Amino acid sequence: MTKIYHFIGIKGSGMSALALMLHQMGHKVQGSDVDKYYFTQRGLEQAGIKILPFDAKNIQADYEIIAGNAFRPDNNVEIAYANEHGISYKRYHEFLGGFMRDFVSFGVAGAHGKTSTTGILSHVLSNITDTSYLIGDGTGRGSAGAKYFVFESDEYERHFMPYHPEYSIITNIDFDHPDYFTSLEDVFNAFNDYAKQITKGLFIYGEDEQLRRITSEAPIYYYGFEKENDFVAHDLLRSTTGSTFKVSYRGQELGEFHIPTFGRHNIMNATAVIGLLYVSGFDLNLVREHLKTFAGVKRRFTEKVVNGTVIIDDFAHHPTEIIATLDAARQKYPSKEIVAIFQPHTFTRTIALLDEFADALNQADAVYLAQIYGSAREVDHGDVKVEDLAEKIVKRVQVVSVDNVSPLLDHDNAVYVFMGAGDIQTYEYSFERLLSNLTSNVQ
């Protein structure tokens, strides 16, 4: 009898990607989740993967059960039923730790840039050779015959500790997830523990002072813009069609590369991928060719045009990410006003980084704020409101509601950048409807 994989919380970005990958490898896959629409479910539906409402009847003793990390016996009937009846299940990261041992594995870790970098590496490598991959935007590809496996290594609650990849990139270390990590040193210790599990090569952004402290049994290669790194990106040309740059390795020129994405951070992400694939023996001419066709990942600088108005959707929910996203917007649209619409994600993060959020948002020309999106993990919301953030922003700023986004119309020749990890897309959709209605009324 063929084993059935059942996912509790299948719409989660990592969970949906894993479900898709297993389905494409020929396994029987199903899952359960809440009824609310989430952007990952379209891919599941297109693959014909059954999505059920949460119900204890979904749990069978002979299923391979993979449970999302947010679900516990006190908030999910399936977890409660499994515990009560002694039915075993694995968390996403526990399952993945065992699964990856069948491949040559490439991990991508870091406080920011994991998904974009995993996307670049997956795109390039899968165009060169048969590759399975998991990207944190809900995208997964599985091949039963693949030798290589690319995946995202998430530091939250030290979930990456079951992972022992041959190679890994670490993009940066930053203080985040204050509901779990107690300090920057606590974050560093988690990444340092992860680094010790890499076996063949570790690729580290060399201009991050925390990352310079990392130690590993595997050889460490530093990448960056400055000459003391092993892999150096130089002669940058940033234009409205993307970024062109040269890369050298310990003084040896590796040639010129182009990636059709924006922002200095994406040059670094691409340089990390170039370094990893060079050291692991791949043809750089093929790497160069396939970098040119990278189309991006979901919710990372995803663009659409609604009746002549450019709208950018981005997952940025930390000050460092906001700065990178706004930098990318200015590169692509140097003559337009950059309007940021931001929804703070979690009360704990907003309290911990209030000043940093204000400084980052001041990089925009105008700022609109949505109400703070709390997490189910937060018992105490603390004494913080979105108005506290608004008071610290020196640029034009206003708090808007999802039911009234009309103040956003007060701009000519603007690009609208919607940022957040909660339900910021509901504000985006409200604005799109408003733009559409304006056009139909004119007609």
Image: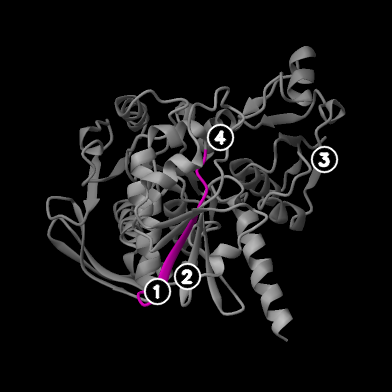
Q: Which residue is mark 1?
A: 333
Q: Amino acid at mark 4?
A: Leu
Q: CA distance from mark 2 to mark 4?
A: 39 Å
Q: Residue at x 77, y 35 (%)?
A: 3
Q: Which mark identifies residue 96?
A: 4
Query: Could you tell me if the residues under marks 2 and 3 are in contact, i.e. CB atoms within 8 Å?
Result: no
Q: CA distance from mark 1 to mark 3?
A: 43 Å
Q: Amino acid at mark 2?
A: Val
Q: Amino acid at mark 1?
A: Tyr
Query: Could you tell me if the residues under marks 2 and 1 are in contact, i.e. CB atoms within 8 Å?
Result: yes
| Image location (x, y in percent) of residue 321 | 39, 50
Q: Of discs 1 and 3, which sits in the foreground?
A: 1
Q: Which residue is mark 2?
A: 415
Q: Which residue is mark 3?
A: 52
Q: CA distance from mark 4 to mark 3?
A: 23 Å
In-front residue for pair 57/417: 417
